[in-house]
């Protein structure tokens, strides 16, 4: 047959001391330090037997109680500067009275909080019913729909659609042009003729990107001394002629 021992848990060591004082109806200003020390240590020993970790603050107060107890057993009492006897319990009593005062205030605040939580705010009953129904029923939003709300939703959707449709779009296109490729294209055109006009090159591929790559290819051919330029007739027109053709004429 096994026995289960349950010990009350306290928020801190002063809470435990106040429990002993109130339980035994002791005078807090004249604490029987020997008895309350023994009760305090017995409680800590029981916690240790139950493998419950004892907090450092409990151990500190236990050491303080034992120190006060040893001072009160001394034959010579301690005196202050005016020759009055110093009560070793004075500091402990002071802390207990402060803790008791704050504890009573906390209890009052806890009761006020609990009372406030129990109160329900008065509000719009229909609105509260809708809120409750929305939390348990997914289709509850349909219960308050009317033609005006549907039209407003439709208008908002169409406005968003127009905004999305008119947004500027940036599309990156990979053009099939390279400078080396257009350079070969120009030299192929000059394979069976002496020269070719830039306008004719444009006519073969009027794409703006192709024109740019063809112009860059001509500049590279000039740098490689493979072609020369002849200013022709017409606005912004010139002729491209192979350099070997020019050298043969010379």
Image (cartoon, rainbow, N blue to C red):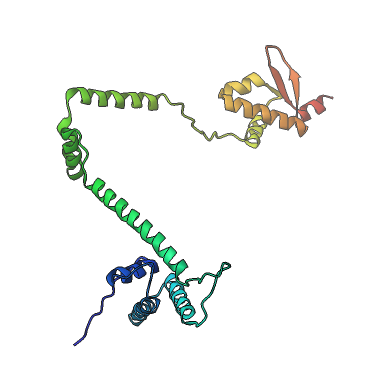
Where does the image place residue 69, in percent across and percent down from the top left?
44, 78
Quadrant housing residue 244: top right
Where does the image place residue 87, in percent across and percent down from the top left?
47, 71
Q: Is residue 192 left or right of residue 39?
A: right
Residue at coordinates 49% horizontally, 30% vertically from top-left? 170
Where does the image place residue 206, in percent across and percent down from the top left?
56, 22
Q: As rendered, which of 148 and 202 lies closer to the eye?
A: 148
Residue at coordinates 63% horizontally, 26% vertically from top-left? 212
Quadrant housing residue 123: top left
Q: Is residue 55 left or right of residue 197?
A: left
**Residue at the right extreme of this rendering:** 250
Where does the image place residue 245, in percent across and percent down from the top left?
77, 27
**Residue at the front extreme of this rendering:** 83
Q: As rendered, which of 236 and 32 lies closer to the eye?
A: 32
Q: Is residue 118 above or below residue 46?
A: above
Q: Is residue 232 left or right of residue 129?
A: right
Task: Please identify the quadrant where the C terminus is shown.
Answer: top right
**Residue at the top extreme of this rendering:** 234
Q: Does the rendering let one see residue 191?
A: no
Q: Is residue 39 above or below residue 18?
A: below
Residue at coordinates 58% horizontally, 34% vertically from top-left? 177
């Amino acid at each position: 047959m096994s026995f289960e021992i349950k010990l009350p848990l306290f928020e801190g060591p002063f809470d435990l001391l106040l429990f002993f004082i109130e339980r035994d109806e002791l005078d807090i200003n004249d604490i029987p330090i020997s008895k309350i020390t023994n009760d305090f240590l017995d409680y800590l020993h029981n916690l240790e037997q139950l493998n419950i970790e004892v907090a450092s603050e409990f151990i500190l107060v236990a050491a303080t109680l034992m120190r006060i107890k040893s001072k009160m057993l001394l034959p010579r009492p301690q005196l202050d500067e005016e020759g009055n006897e110093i009560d070793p319990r004075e500091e402990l009593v002071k802390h207990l009275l402060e803790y008791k005062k704050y504890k009573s205030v906390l209890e009052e605040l806890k009761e006020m909080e609990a009372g406030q939580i129990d109160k329900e705010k008065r509000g719009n009953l229909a609105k509260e019913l809708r809120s409750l129904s929305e939390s348990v029923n997914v289709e509850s939003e349909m219960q308050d729909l009317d033609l005006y709300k549907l039209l407003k939703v439709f208008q908002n959707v169409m406005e968003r659609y127009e905004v999305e449709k008119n947004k500027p779009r940036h599309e990156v296109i990979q053009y099939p042009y390279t400078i080396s490729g257009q350079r070969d294209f120009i030299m192929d055109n000059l394979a069976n003729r002496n020269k070719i006009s830039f306008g004719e090159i444009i006519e073969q591929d009027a794409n703006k990107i192709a024109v740019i790559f063809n112009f860059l290819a001509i500049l590279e051919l000039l740098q490689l001394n493979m072609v020369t330029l002849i200013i022709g007739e017409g606005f912004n027109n010139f002729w491209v002629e192979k350099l070997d053709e020019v050298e043969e004429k010379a």
